Amino acid sequence: MGRAFEVRKVAMAKTAAVKSKVYAKYGKEIYMAAKAGVPDPELNGQLKRVIERAKKDQVPSDTIKRAIEKAKGGSDETYSEARYEGFGPGNSVFIVECLTDNVNRTIAEVRNCFTKTGGKLGISGSVIHQFNHNAVFELNGTTEDAVLELLVENDLDVSDIESEEDCVTILAEASEFNNIRTALSESAPDLEVTTEEIMWLPIMTVELTESHDQETFERLMGMLEELDDVQDVYHNIKAD
């Protein structure tokens, strides 16, 4: 399988999270984006992008509306971003991104997930160098040549372009996200963009050859997915 397949596997929320967790995840992001700027997606680019991603993940309109109304209501509830790096089975490494209103609680809960599955939480910087912070776009119903032409016409700098069947994946530095997104929306508004996110992608992957390691990985992922504060989990384990 190509990188496009790996990308779909690497983000927790795109694979196994239950609907309620996905709704809660976007509820926090929408609330924070609305609170940080104006609660109008037409005037707040960040809010608009989060809402568009939420709709692609089939988050109900009521959930989106409630999060915006909560921000409009002047709620003093606030969340801070927290990123944790850890070590799992079979030389695997993890980045766990959270939105939390209590950092002490969150780090304790995340550490517990690793400890109970035989892993450990690392210090800041212990894992992140094994990942690239990439803007990722997946486009359906187009060709690699057509996408390359669009990128050249708009003088866009990308790291890689991969094609698999009728899906084309664009990888670029995270700083290029807005430039590419704008070019796609203005130059090819009818193009079906199935993914447009900034992700941590592993530079090298590892394969879990032992059934015990695979079971441990699944247990660790399951425990992390159950934590309310966890937004996304990235790892370097090669997808089956």
Image (cartoon, rainbow, N blue to C red):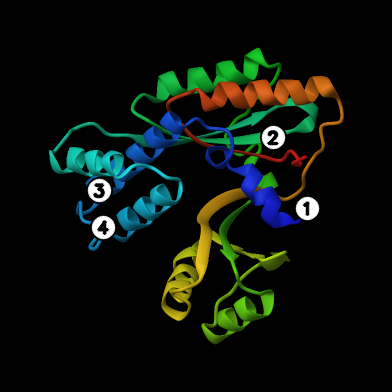
Binning the other alpha carbons within 10 Å of mark 2 as few (below 14), some (14 to 19) or many (20 upward) gives: many
Name the residue located 71 percent from the left edge and 56 percent from the top edge.
Answer: 3
Name the residue located 61 percent from the left edge and 83 percent from the top edge.
Answer: 149
Binning the other alpha carbons within 10 Å of mark 1 as few (below 14), some (14 to 19) or many (20 upward) gives: few
Q: Are marks 1 and 3 in contact (CB under 8 Å)?
A: no
Secondary structure, mark 3, is: helix
| Disc nearer the start of the sequence (1/3) | 1
| Percent x, y of residue 77 | 23, 31
Binning the other alpha carbons within 10 Å of mark 4 as few (below 14), some (14 to 19) or many (20 upward) gives: some
| Percent x, y of residue 173 | 57, 62
| Residues at marks 3 and 2, CA–CA distance in whole angstroms | 33 Å
Which residue lies under the disc numbered 2? 93
Query: In the rendered view, would you say 86 is above or below 54?
Result: above
| Residues at marks 2 and 1, CA–CA distance in whole angstroms | 21 Å
Q: Amino acid at mark 1?
A: Met
| Residues at marks 1 and 3, CA–CA distance in whole angstroms | 38 Å
Which residue lies under the disc numbered 3? 34
| Residues at marks 3 and 4, CA–CA distance in whole angstroms | 8 Å
